[in-house]
Image: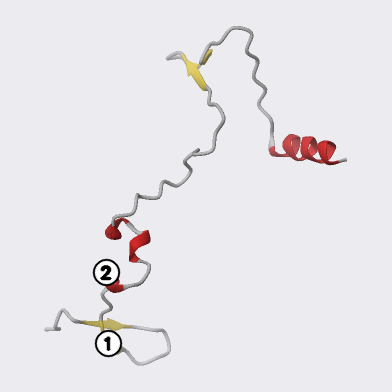
Amino acid sequence: MLDNRYALLFIRGERPVMDLKYDILKHPAVRLTTDGQATPYVHGAADRANFSIELVFDPTGTLTGVMPDTVAATYELLSEEDIEKELKEKQS
């Protein structure tokens, strides 16, 4: 039986180590985590987007529309290479 205050640490090529566990709630940066009441980090969120579009498909997988459907709006999907080319042209 091992006391809950201890942890066993196994490192390849070394003898096992028994050490006291660290209380992460006492870490100085805990305020940056949800345990410290910070807002959760959402990976991949578009928090700086100027607009968004949604591609609408029917049950067969055919593209049926682009939302929002605004009058006289045109959209162009650029690849990473296209964006780099546009940026280089604007810098020169």
- Rendering coords of residue 12 (x, y %): 41, 84
Give the residue number, with chain letter if any, for mark 1.
19
Give the farthest residue toward the bottom: 15
Give the class, few, some or many, for how many residues have Cα within 10 Å of label 1's Cα (few <14, many ≥20).
few
Residue at 18% in and 81% down: 5
Quadrant of the image containing the N terminus: bottom left
Q: Nearer the viewer, residue 30 or 59?
A: 30
> Is 7 drawn above or below residue 88 in the view shown?
below
**Type of amino acid at the residue the image marks with label 1:** Asp
Quadrant of the image containing the C terminus: top right
Give the residue number, with chain letter if any, for mark 2.
25
> Is 64 drawn above or below residue 29 in the view shown?
above
Say whether disc 2 or disc 1 marks the residue closer to the N-terminus.
1
- Quarter of the image where one finds residue 86: top right
Residue at 27% in and 83% down: 8
Give the SS element for disc 2: helix
User: What's the CA distance linking mark 2 and mark 1?
Assistant: 18 Å
Residue at 35% in and 50% down: 40
Decide if residue 51 is on the left or right side of residue 79: left
> Is 40 drawn above or below residue 88 in the view shown?
below
Decide if residue 18 is on the left or right side of residue 45: left
**Type of amino acid at the residue the image marks with label 2:** Leu
Label 2 or label 1, whichever lies nearer to me, is: 2
- Rendering coords of residue 20 (x, y %): 25, 85
- Rendering coords of residue 64 (x, y %): 52, 11
Residue at 73% in and 36% down: 83
Q: Nearer the viewer, residue 52 or 13?
A: 52
Q: Nearer the viewer, residue 53 or 10?
A: 53
Give the farthest residue toward the top: 71
Decide if residue 51 is on the left or right side of residue 19: right
